[in-house]
Amino acid sequence: MSSMLVRHASVLVSMDDHRREISDGGLFIRDGFIDQVAPTAELPQTADEILDLSGHLLLPGLINTHHHFYQTLTRVVPAAQNANLFNWLKTLFPIWARLRPEDIRLSTQTALAELALSGCTTASDHLYLFPNGSQLDDEILAARETGLRLHASRGSMSLGESQGGLPPDSVVEDEDIILKDSQRLIETYHDPNPGAMTQIVLAPCSPFSVTGDLMRQSASLAREYGVHLHTHLAETQDEESFCLQKFGYRPVAYMELLNWIGPDVWFAHSVHVNSQEMRLYGEAACGVAHCPTSNMRLASGIAPIQEMLQWGVKVGLGVDGSASNDGSNMLEEVRQAMLLARLNAALHGASLSGEDAPALMTARQALELATRGGAAVLGRTDLGSLEPGKCADFFAVRLNHLTFAGGLHDPLAALVFCSPVHAEYTVVGGKFVVKEGKLITLDRPRLIEQHNRAAKRLLNG
Ligand SMILES: [Zn+2]
């Protein structure tokens, strides 16, 4: 038995069912799970470890629902800086084909380090290329060293250029191998229990890079084992045209046909979805990973998040891969989600004044997407809020920042409206990943040096 007392947070943001915000709040933690959430005066006085958060804002750990860690090695590649999705992919595929197992390991740690410093405690990653002997195991083992929770998606691509797909034949895999490896990974690593550090997800890359048959077989394998399904969907207008031309269906209808609609499925993006499709998502309890920065970076469009929420769709946030963001900062993504939803309201509401003005996404709603929303999307009832029985996953930011000066009448809103700051503490399952602003599970200077060397090798070929 080990215990931890967290006390005197200026404001504790619970994100519980009542959305309680507790002044001078704290937590009492036992063995990695939350035992009590209350004003400090009502908590036990002692514990094995005590963390004083005077002058800090305390929140549930943020949950990232879409990423491609390996892309941290190919940020701002000149030829891909100003391209839309399909051209961006065609530029980067040959570079990614040079990835080695060591690159997967380094990029996993770099991305998770950035995420942890932005308050993230659980990340989903989508790895769909396995060149030169790389395996999802490389990512899982590297993530374990960082202390963050990982939902590792066994991605795949099987529809090469010669078969009418987008990726070059050199990076696609045989479907039998994909399915066998998926099964092996689930049996080796998937933990369905509360507090799980590792879960496996099956994730054929997108409608334009795998066959319908692989999507169907992945769905039945996932359901046999009770793991989640994930893919990119309705990201761009190009994808919609591709699906209509090649399959005769819009992307969402194509998913329905392949048995890919249900509470165990979440889609990255869903920018180009109509009201009927959003209603279907809501009724079937499908999730969406909203990636506002990536959607702007690749000029993909604006996902209608406010409307999705009205249809009862589960929505989480994703930073997406670092070749289309080009960062892994969850707090920045929360801010972008709020701002982009407001721009969308302006574009769809004739006027922003008067009774007819569309409701604007609030800072609290944006943070809800990154906490409760993300947990719902990943199917984690043990994450997403600070409540007794949930995992002790949280982060805290210092409030005496220049960034927040003049905004402390509402510290929670300041965290979203003002520029993103780094977490002072990030704790996963009661264990520190960031302490006093420093990463404690990784050697940051060494990681940066190795990462830059690997990136240079990849780009130079
Ligand atoms: Zn993506």
Image: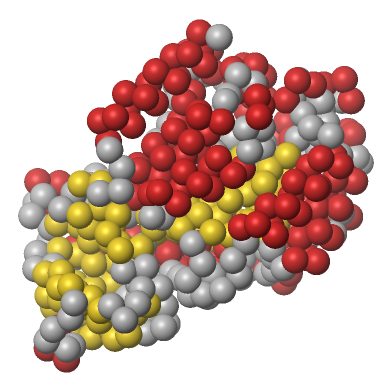
Q: Is residue 429 visible?
A: yes
Q: Is residue 323 depicted above or below 141 in this figure?
A: above
Residue 328 percent location from the top left of the image = 40, 41
Q: Is residue 399 left or right of residue 333?
A: left
Q: Is residue 2 depicted above or below 217 in this figure?
A: below
Task: Choose between 101 and 175: the one closer to the eye.
Answer: 101
- Residue plotted at (8% across, 55% down): 400
- Residue plotted at (11% across, 50% down): 401
- Residue plotted at (35% across, 63% down): 428
Quadrant showing the C terminus: top right
Task: Choose between 12 and 83: the one closer to the eye.
Answer: 12
Q: Is residue 413 depicted above or below 172 in this figure?
A: below
Color encoding of the figure: secondary structure
- Residue plotted at (44% across, 33% down): 106
Picture quadrant of residue 446: top left
Q: Is residue 243 visible?
A: no
Q: Is residue 284 left or right of residue 112?
A: right
Residue 199 percent location from the top left of the image = 58, 60
Residue 278 percent location from the top left of the image = 69, 60
Quadrant showing the N terminus: bottom left
Picture quadrant of residue 42: bottom left
